[in-house]
Image (spheres, grey):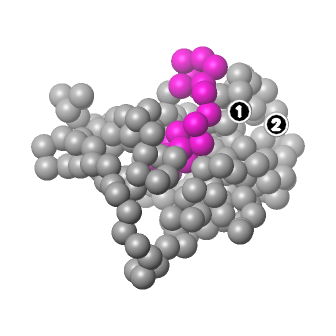
């Protein structure tokens, strides 16, 4: 069994991200972990706009490039995960900003991995599957006309609240309010 840190590092293969992709990836992990938000700002899924806000306010490092060409790497991924985790624990953005300036990359990675350990072990097992593994049951979630999500029933992300969060994240990524 891989350690939570090793499982978290497996997500680095998805980098680089644009702001929207980074926000969606972080949302899926935090939601899969089943962390209960303590307030409205913690409940909100990160968006491309919130990523840019966190960068502008010194909570996250600046991305490579600017504007629509900006890309975010594994460290940005860890920073955004940490922000959302700490918000869900009830910590203010000002306190999070102070923490972020003093924490090293390794400590940040260990803290995030420890908080997300249950979700990481589930997603890690999924990533280790091969074509020879037996096919399991899937849940289908209608998102919009011609768009659906499919989630295997044996993972934590197949819970109703996680499926609703994923559906809403995809709808938000599409930017079409009329899909709601």
Q: Badge 1 is on which residue?
A: 86
Residue 117 drawn above or below residue 42: below
Residue at 53%, 39% in the rendered image: 31
Q: Earlier in the sequence, mark 2 or mark 1?
A: 1
Quadrant for the N terminus in the image:
bottom right
User: Is 126 on the left or on the right of 168, as rendered?
Assistant: right
**For discs 2 and 1, the disc positioned in front in the rendered view:** 1
Asked whether the residues under the numbered discs 2 and 1 touch, taking CB atoms below 8 Å apart as contact, a structural biologist would say yes
Residue 17 drawn above or below residue 48: below
In this view, the residue farthest toward the left is 145
Residue 104 drawn above or below residue 56: below
Q: Position of residue 156 (x, y in %)?
A: 52, 47
Magenta residues (range): 22-43
Residue 88 covered by magenta stretch: no
Q: Position of residue 85 (x, y in %)?
A: 67, 36
Q: Badge 2 is on which residue?
A: 99
Circle 1 SS class: helix
Circle 2 SS class: helix
Residue at 44%, 33% in the rendered image: 161
Residue 24 covered by magenta stretch: yes
Q: Quadrant of residue 97?
A: top right
Q: Main secondary structure of the magenta part?
A: helix
User: Is 44 on the left or on the right of 143, as rendered?
Assistant: right
The one nearer the camera, 38 or 136, is 136
């Amino acid at each position: 069994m891989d350690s939570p840190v090793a499982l978290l590092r497996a997500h680095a293969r998805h980098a680089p991200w644009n702001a929207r992709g980074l926000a969606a990836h972080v949302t899926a992990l935090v939601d899969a972990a089943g962390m209960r938000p303590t307030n409205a700002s913690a409940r909100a899924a990160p968006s491309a706009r919130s990523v840019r806000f966190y960068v502008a306010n010194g909570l996250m490092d600046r991305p490579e490039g600017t504007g629509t060409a900006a890309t975010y790497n594994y460290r940005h991924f860890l920073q955004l995960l940490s922000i959302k985790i700490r918000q869900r624990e009830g910590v203010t953005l000002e306190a999070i900003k102070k923490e972020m300036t003093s924490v090293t990359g390794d400590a940040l990675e260990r803290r995030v991995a420890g908080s997300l350990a249950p979700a990481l072990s589930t997603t890690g097992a999924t990533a280790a599957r091969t074509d020879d593994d037996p096919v399991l049951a899937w849940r289908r979630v209608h998102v919009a006309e011609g768009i659906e999500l499919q989630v295997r029933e044996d993972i934590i992300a197949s819970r109703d609240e996680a499926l609703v969060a994923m559906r809403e994240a995809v709808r938000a990524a599409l930017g079409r309010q009329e899909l709601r």
